[in-house]
Image (cartoon, helix red, strand yellow):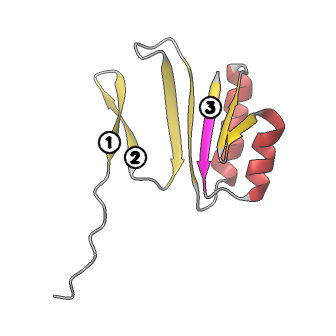
Amino acid sequence: MVVIIVENAPPRLRGRLAVWLLEVRAGVYIGSYSARTRERLWADVTSMIGDGNAVIAWDAPTDAGFAFDTCGSNRRIPVDFDGFTLVSFLAEASPSDGR
């Protein structure tokens, strides 16, 4: 299974994903394809995402049973922790107080 979630994606990318995957909620696409097709779809996402961001998750022979990748600007960053991928949050930019 493949799940791709996009935020602030251009209409052209959303249309491209809708050709291959089922959009079950706004910006949430699912389907079941080979690794080759998944990699091609992800290449399209990374090249067309523009100012948006995206995450892809798929079945994989890992301890968690899945793997994932991200692209675009987002506070959530994948981090390898002894071979197990976890998610780290970047600190929010604090507004300057004018001092």
Q: Nearer the viewer, residue 56 or 22?
A: 22
User: Which residues are drawn in magenta?
Assistant: 3-7
Residue picked out by circle 1: 88
Between the C-alphas of marks 2 and 3, the distance is 17 Å
Residue picked out by circle 3: 3
Badge 3 crowding class, 10 Å Cα cut-off, few under 14, some 14 to 19, many 20 or more, is some
Q: Is disc 2 placed on a helix, strand or loop? A: strand
| Residue 34 placement: quadrant | top right
Query: Which numbered disc, 2 or 3, marks the residue that appears first in the sequence?
Result: 3
Numbered tag placed on residue 80 in the rendering: none
Q: Is disc 1 placed on a helix, strand or loop? A: strand
| 1 shown above or below 94 | above
Badges 1 and 2: C-beta atoms under 8 Å apart? Answer: yes
Q: Position of residue 72 (x, y in %)?
A: 53, 53
* Amino acid at dot 1: Ser
| Residue 80 placement: quadrant | top left
Residue picked out by circle 2: 76
Badges 2 and 3: C-beta atoms under 8 Å apart? Answer: no
